[in-house]
Image: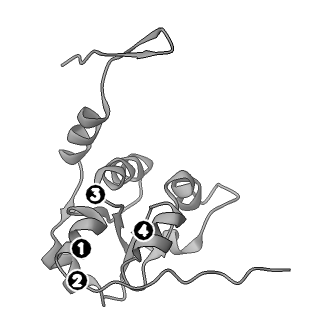
Amino acid sequence: MDYEYSLSLKGILVKLKIGYQQLIDDAMTQIETVPLEQAQKLLSEANVVFVDIRDVRELEREGMIPNALHAPRGMLEFWVDPESPYFKPIFGEGKRLILYCASAWRSALATQTLQKMGVPHVCHLEGGFSAWKAAGLPTAAKVSKPHSN
């Protein structure tokens, strides 16, 4: 279905074929979403990595899931690709990756992208970190890296 969206910016008319909500809706039909209750049970599994893709300021302000790996959304594709100079080995270990953001929008799109790249065992958290916190599930403060002088 073609979706046309008009937006006027400083007198310029921009027509989009598809909006962000349709992108998210499409991604949701192609990816696995892990319910909160199941995710909580997976928290202590050695072969599962929770991946927080939010901006560092969000983590500092809101906290994060305990022991989650912070992988900023803007670097994710570079961190998972072994051919990239930014590759992080944890992404090549074959562990189940559970991506999350604040409300499961960015993580849905990121999960879809990683699937397209061929990353195995990737899914995302239902409702994101907001739903996790609202359910009273455990959170931890973002551990800041020491500043070098």
- For residue 119, which quarter of the picture? bottom left
Mark sitting earlier along the chain (2/4): 4
Locate residue 67, reporting x and y percent. Answer: 43, 85
Reading the image, the residue beneath label 1 is 132
Residues at marks 3 and 2, CA–CA distance in whole angstroms: 15 Å
- For residue 26, which quarter of the picture? top left
Mark sitting earlier along the chain (4/3): 4
**Above-or-below relation of 92 to 78:** below
Reading the image, the residue beneath label 2 is 137
**Amino acid bearing label 2:** Leu
- The secondary structure type at the circle numbered 3 is loop
**Amino acid bearing label 3:** Ser
Reading the image, the residue beneath label 3 is 103
Q: Are marks 3 and 1 in contact (CB under 8 Å)?
A: no
Reading the image, the residue beneath label 4 is 52
Quarter of the picture containing the N terminus is top left
Mark 1 nearby-residue class (10 Å; few <14, some 14–19, many ≥20): many
Mark sitting earlier along the chain (3/2): 3
Mark sitting earlier along the chain (1/4): 4
**Amino acid bearing label 1:** Trp
Residues at marks 4 and 3, CA–CA distance in whole angstroms: 12 Å
Which residue is at a point 50% across and 60% down the rendered structure image? 55
Mark sitting earlier along the chain (2/1): 1
Locate residue 15, reporting x and y percent. Answer: 37, 13
Which residue is at a point 28% across and 62% down the rendered structure image? 124
